[in-house]
């Protein structure tokens, strides 16, 4: 074992990896605190995780029409996502191929061409270079337009979710998502879904993995962190959040399914559409859920939650990205999704339900981010690493998965377990060691 008196930033990369292999022990429920506060680990995981895996970029309903485009962040690099006039969605590195200027500075819009603000090079939204000011005169007609096409970025979609990757040889997206799609379908594939409004963005002084880990398995915190909702009578009792199932699948994905629910939290009139898009088993589970909380490795989380608005149960569906900015800072980006064919009144109420609970003004979001900030503070600096301070992730290690749940993966019959987090860190460590 490398002695902890050698600082991580003084080690060679292979030594850092070796130190991680020796100190991160998910099978034993041992996760070192420095993983959430150390700049060297942060830098290495950018290279080993974010540059290799699929990263969520947005939803297809954000670019429904030909000419629509978005600019988004793929592992720290700006990319353009554009639907060209042929209806095909493509992505490009947001850089003019002439001299490197950021080609598009808007968040979103609609146009068929992008013109570089530096020298005016003009690109079609298919990536082709089509115009260069004075080119016949100043390049003598010799400029190779084909070679100057925009750099295309690999993207793929699953049920409207757009992911991108810098990996030249990635595992196909569908395979990467694996069995977790069975659960994800209930969140984003139960009906045609649309994003309402632009995503909300807010910066939190928190390490990014805390959010991902919270959503992959931690329903245990709700009875304390969110204890005020019990006092307010919004949920019946403190162990309300224990009931249901915890599931994890390969590649670190996982989540919690809150069940049962005596009421139907979705739209009665869309039941035929739900049944068309889901298997009978998926529909049965969905009909009975209170909430679905999950994380797709590494940093996309999803949430179906509900509140009772004027006596009617209204679900709300959101996606959230824990975008790393620094070892102790992240940007949280949240997308609100709703059934496209829902009545306007339902859409409005569902959005209100989301704003009351999550989003920057939501009671749960504020409870959580305060905790995330303080965990980051205790993980940061020399002490947690030098003193070998570890977290305890042993909850539920004594339990055996159930075999009678209709969905795939490793499933436990209540939500209070850290099995999903152990699975998440197992895959994280696997990627860091490659
Ligand atoms: Fe929470």
Image (tube, rainbow, N blue to C red):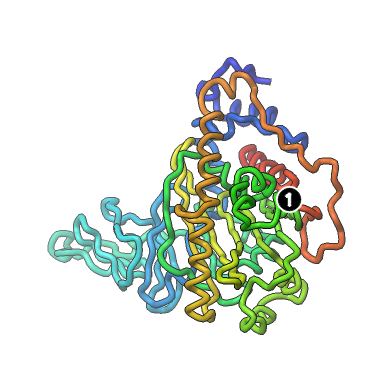
Left or right placement of residue 286 versus residue 353 in this view: right
Residue 286 position in % (x across, y down): 70, 70
Q: Nearer the viewer, residue 341 or 50?
A: 341
Secondary structure found at label 1: helix
Left or right placement of residue 413 versus residue 299 in this view: right
The quarter of the image holding the N terminus is top right
The quarter of the image holding the C terminus is top right
Left or right placement of residue 193 versus residue 404 in this view: left
Q: Nearer the viewer, residue 26 or 101?
A: 26
Residue 347 position in % (x across, y down): 50, 74
Res. 159 in view: yes
Q: Nearer the viewer, residue 140 or 15?
A: 15
Q: Nearer the viewer, residue 102 or 195?
A: 195
Note whether 327 is above or below 165 in the view shown: above
Q: Which residue matches tag 1?
A: 239
Q: What residue is rendered at 62% in x and 66% in y?
A: 187
Q: What residue is rendered at 59% in x and 15% in y?
A: 5
Left or right placement of residue 133 versus residue 112 in this view: left
Q: What residue is rendered at 71% in x and 53% in y?
A: 237
Res. 165 in view: no
Check the image and name the residue furthest to the top: 5
């Amino acid at each position: 074992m490398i002695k902890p008196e050698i600082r991580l930033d003084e080690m060679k990369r292979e030594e850092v990896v070796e130190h991680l292999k020796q100190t991160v022990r998910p099978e034993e429920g041992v996760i070192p605190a420095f993983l959430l506060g150390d700049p060297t680990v942060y830098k290495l995981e950018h290279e080993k995780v974010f540059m290799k895996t699929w990263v969520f970029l947005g939803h297809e309903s954000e670019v429904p029409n030909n000419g629509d485009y978005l600019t988004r962040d793929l592992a720290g690099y700006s990319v353009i996502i554009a639907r060209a006039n042929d209806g095909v969605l493509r992505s490009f590195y947001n850089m003019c191929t002439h001299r490197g200027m950021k080609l598009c500075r808007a968040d979103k819009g609609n146009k068929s061409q992008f013109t570089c603000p530096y020298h005016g090079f003009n690109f079609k939204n298919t990536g082709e270079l089509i115009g260069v000011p004075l080119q016949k005169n100043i390049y003598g007609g010799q400029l190779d337009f084909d070679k100057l096409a925009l750099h295309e970025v690999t993207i793929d979609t699953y049920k409207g979710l757009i992911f991108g990757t810098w990996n030249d040889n990635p595992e196909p997206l569908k395979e990467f998502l694996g069995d977790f799609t069975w659960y994800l379908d209930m969140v984003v594939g139960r009906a045609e879904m649309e994003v309402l409004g632009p995503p909300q963005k807010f910066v939190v002084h928190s390490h990014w993995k805390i959010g991902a880990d919270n959503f992959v398995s931690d329903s245990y915190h709700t009875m304390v962190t969110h204890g005020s909702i019990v006092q307010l009578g919004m949920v019946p009792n403190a162990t309300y959040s224990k009931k249901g199932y915890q599931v994890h699948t390969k590649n670190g994905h996982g989540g919690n399914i809150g069940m049962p629910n005596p009421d139907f939290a979705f739209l009665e009139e869309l039941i035929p559409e739900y049944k068309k898009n889901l298997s009978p088993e998926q529909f049965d589970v969905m009909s009975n859920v209170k909430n679905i909380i999950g994380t797709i490795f590494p940093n996309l989380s999803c949430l179906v939650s509900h509140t009772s608005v004027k006596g009617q149960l209204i679900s709300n569906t959101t996606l959230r990205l824990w975008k790393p900015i620094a070892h102790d800072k992240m940007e949280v980006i949240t997308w609100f999704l709703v059934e496209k064919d829902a009545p306007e009144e339902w859409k409005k109420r569902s959005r209100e339900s989301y704003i009351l609970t999550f989003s920057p003004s939501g009671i749960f979001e504020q409870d959580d981010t305060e905790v995330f900030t303080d965990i980051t503070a205790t993980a940061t600096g020399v002490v947690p690493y030098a003193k070998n301070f570890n977290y305890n992730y042993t909850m539920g290690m004594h339990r055996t998965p159930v075999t009678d749940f209709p969905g795939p993966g490793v499933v436990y019959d209540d939500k209070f377990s850290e099995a999903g987090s152990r699975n998440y860190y197992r895959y994280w460590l696997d990627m860091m060691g490659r």
